[in-house]
Image (cartoon, grey):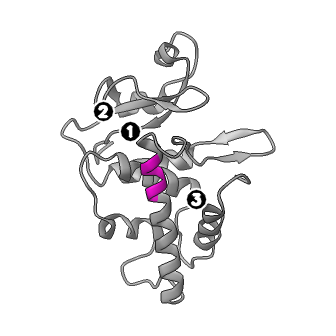
Amino acid sequence: MSDLPLYLKQLDKLLLNLPTEAMLLSELDGYLTGIVVCPELVMPSEWLPGIWGAEDDEPVFEDSRQAEKLMLLVMEHYNSIARGLNGSSGGFAPVFDVDTRHDEVLWELWIDGFDQAMRLRPTPEAGRVQVLWWDGQRWKAPGPFGTPTMTLDRARTETPEEGHLHSRTSGLIQMITAASSPEA
């Protein structure tokens, strides 16, 4: 994650220094992406507390300046994701951590964040999700939101081997972009 924009490096550092179990940057990126693609508007007053990881009465910020800086950086990233998914500003690319020992992408935290966001607004077609495909350069949707869909369990366990669903778009399943049911 060394090639991150300055605002994301600042956000990462501030999140790591919170006294609570706040989201890590990759998890936050998935969470905000889920908020952006949610078919129903989720107000910031509902989704912001999920970032900080604090209990209702637990203090999160050292002072109002820290709170304001964090909010500004979170909203900047939210807007950046929205612009990217709308096709402006160079497109969308998720923020994944990488295990430098094995050069392995650690996508699980991102998916956890995305799943948390989806649980805020389950769709009427509970338990079914749409899948986007990563072609090595950008995310591609095989159709408009909702088609094709598969069960959340299948999307979570789909493997990137030839002959599976991903081969139709020569990419890997990397991101789920519709809602999961709260029971999933």
- Observer-side mark, 2 or 3, equals 2
Side of 145 where 136 appears, left or right: right
Q: Secondary structure at mark 3?
A: helix
Residue 128 versus residue 18 in the image, above or below? above
Number of numbered tags placed on the structure image: 3
The CA distance from mark 3 to mark 1 is 19 Å
* Crowding at mark 3 (Cα within 10 Å: few <14, some 14-19, many 20+): many
At label 2, which amino acid type do we have?
Answer: Phe
SS at circle 2: loop
Residues drawn in magenta: 78-83
Q: Amino acid at mark 3?
A: Leu
Which badge, 1 or 2, comes first in the chain's sequence?
2
Residue sticking out furthest to the bottom: 63
The image shows residue 77 at horizontal and vertical percentages of 50, 59
Q: Earlier in the sequence, mark 3 or mark 1?
A: 3
In percent of width and height, residue 53 lies at 46, 69
The residue under label 2 is 145
